[in-house]
Amino acid sequence: MDLGLKDRVAIVAASSQGLGRAVAMGLAREGAKLAICARTEATLKATAEEICKATGVEVFSKPVDVTSHDQVRAFVRETSERFGRLDICVTNAGGPPAKPFSDTTVEDWQNGVNLNLMSALYFAREVLPLMQKRQWGRLIAITSSAVKQPIDNLILSNSVRAAVSGMAKSLSNEYAKDNVLVSNVCPGYTLTARLDELSAKLASTEGVTLQKIQERWTSQIPMGRLAQPEEFANLVVFLASERSSYITGVSIPVDGGFVKGV
């Protein structure tokens, strides 16, 4: 199937590793031109070089702190000026720390809001007018299966990512008339550095091995295994494409059946 992504221009945030990197590589394999960002310049540069070498597409990379509106604004402007257009934006950011409510501080909550909700808002504010002007666009938020089924000890992520989903649903209603589609994709337990971080935290708290934690998670997944980042990326790439032309306002889990709701 031709996804119609050749020469489209896509921003993928927090894309030097993990889910963001997999999404960026997936879009590049379909011929999309890329703008990628992350905080660590060395890792970001290595990822850009790898994607370019593997796919031959043009990749613009820039260190960006997604909690800074000024930095996000500048990054979007430079991307639009460099490529002459902007078609796709995938918002993404690392998750807040794993804690029960009793251990969280007001500062933890403020940081979580800035990291996950405000960063998505900053990108939305900058990219939506550009997409609206061209009457074509895809804004896709990477959230978490926690927005469908809250996860123990992840109250910050459960709460703030749910706010992102609510924002995306509202935006999908407002911008549908402009052929700008807005959706959420909700990863489950996926083999990334973030998962290693969460499992190590739980293992330390409970006094068990990291393997025990991951075996527990796997036992809750009907497919009986954890996901590969590329399996998540495949859905994002489809939603970013021409072929998703009647899909908007949805929150789709990629979780091997972990979420138990209908």
Image: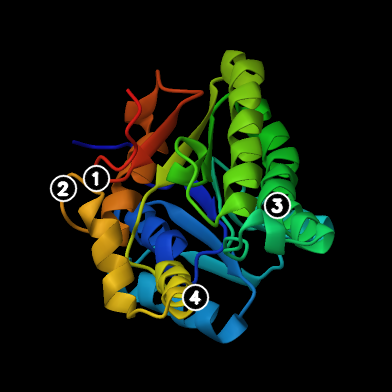
Q: For mark 4, what is the residue? A: 205
Q: For mark 2, what is the residue? A: 223
> Mark 1 or mark 3, which is nearer the start of the sequence?
3
> Mark 2 or mark 3, which is nearer the start of the sequence?
3
Q: Is residue 162 above or below residue 110?
A: above
Q: CA distance from mark 1 to mark 4?
A: 27 Å
Q: Could you say where residue 230 lies in the image, as x and y percent from the top left?
A: 28, 58
Q: For mark 3, what is the residue? A: 119
Q: CA distance from mark 3 to mark 2?
A: 33 Å
- Residue at the spot 47% in from the left edge and 49% down from the top edge: 151
Packing grade of label 1 (10 A; few <14, some 14-19, many >=20) is some
- Mark 4 is on which residue type? Thr
Residue 13 vs residue 223, the one in the foreground: 223
Q: Is residue 252 left or right of residue 140?
A: left
- Residue at the spot 66% in from the left edge and 31% down from the top edge: 167
- Mark 1 is on which residue type? Gly
Tell me whether circle 1 and circle 4 mark residues in contact (CB < 8 Å).
Answer: no
